[in-house]
Image (tube, rainbow, N blue to C red):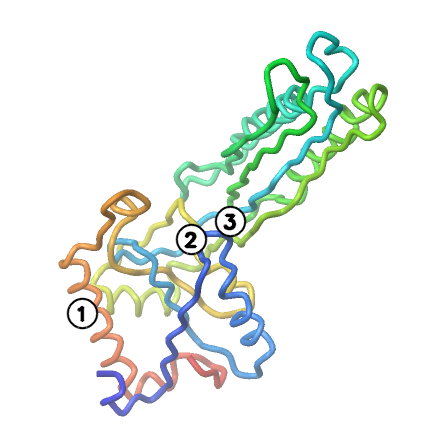
Amino acid sequence: RFLAQPLRMPLHLAFSYDEEVGCLGVRSLVAHLKASPEKPALCIIGEPTAMQPVYGHKGKVAMRCQVRGRACHSAYAPQGVNAIEQAAQLIGHIVRVGESLRQTQDARFDPPFSTLQVGTIQGGAALNIVPQDCQFDFELRTLPAADVDGVLENIAAFARDQLLPTMRERAPESEIALQPLGAYPGLLTDPQGDFARWLAQWSGSDTFSTVAFGTEGGLFDEIGIATLVCGPGSMAQGHKADEFVAVEQLERCMQMLGNLCDWMRAESVINCTKAKTQP
């Protein structure tokens, strides 16, 4: 349908991969667009929002922590450095930092504060051996204006200043290493702007909201491309067995695309942006 119409601006479809593990696949496209003299005027991220326009979501940083102690027979536990116990102390600190993040709230989001949580942990070889190694992964989901670096430095400083000195008194080889696994920025755009007004018309919904999950939208927004999120389906049916998108949602999406197609062939579309950009 788009190809058959005399569109007055170009339409680009972008397909990415590895979105679920840190928005990895889209990075080369974002880099290409950032270096291009002409950028898209508008970007719609097609994540499942039940066809409701979304103007914001949180950012995310995923981290891995590897703790190295010293193994010994559990009968002589004080001679070793228990990596699991040291990891537990650091996890306790992460929980406390997470609690402190509740002090800064933004009612536009649910939950209305940044969150920290530990998702996986592995360690130890046998009950009668003081564990030498422990590894755990944690994630930070932040409000768009949150101080991500400050939170991570708080955690790193606790490991460096509070845990490692005592560990190295018994085992100089002890180590606590923090490794980033992936990250993407939050998104917070203007729900009162022209793009929002147009998307409301195309989708047939002027109910704008935020979502708790992340998208690639923040990456496009960071390089100056007006970005909103709207797509068929719901996260209520996602990330579980037998996930699905309702036929009714696909029909509403097709209607939105039809409305977009009609808008892109109208003469007024030429004035949608002040700059000469390629959408």
Residue 261: x, y in percent? 25, 80
How many marks the image carries: the answer is: 3
At 47% from the left and 81% from the top, the residue drawn is: 274
Whether the residues at callouts 2 and 1 have beta carbons within 8 Å, the answer is: no
Inter-mark Cα distance, 2 to 1: 23 Å
Figure quadrant of the N terminus: bottom left
Where is residue 55? Give x, y as percent: 39, 56
Give x and y (percent) for residue 62. 56, 44
Residue 212 placement, left or right of 258: right
Q: Residue at x 76, y 32 (%)?
A: 175
Q: Amino acid at mark 1?
A: Gln
Q: Hey, which quadrant is residue 76 in on the image?
A: top right
48 and 277: which is toward the camera: 48
Q: Residue furthest bottom?
A: 6
- Vertically, is 238 above or below 98? below
Which comes before the other along the chain, label 1 or label 3? Answer: 3
Tell me if mark 3 has few (under 14), some (14-19) or many (20+) residues whose alpha carbon lies within 10 angstroms of its own.
many
Q: Indicate the amino acid at tag 3.
A: Gly
Cα separation between marks 1 and 3: 30 Å
Structural distance between the alpha carbons of marks 3 and 2 = 10 Å
The label shown at residue 59 is 3
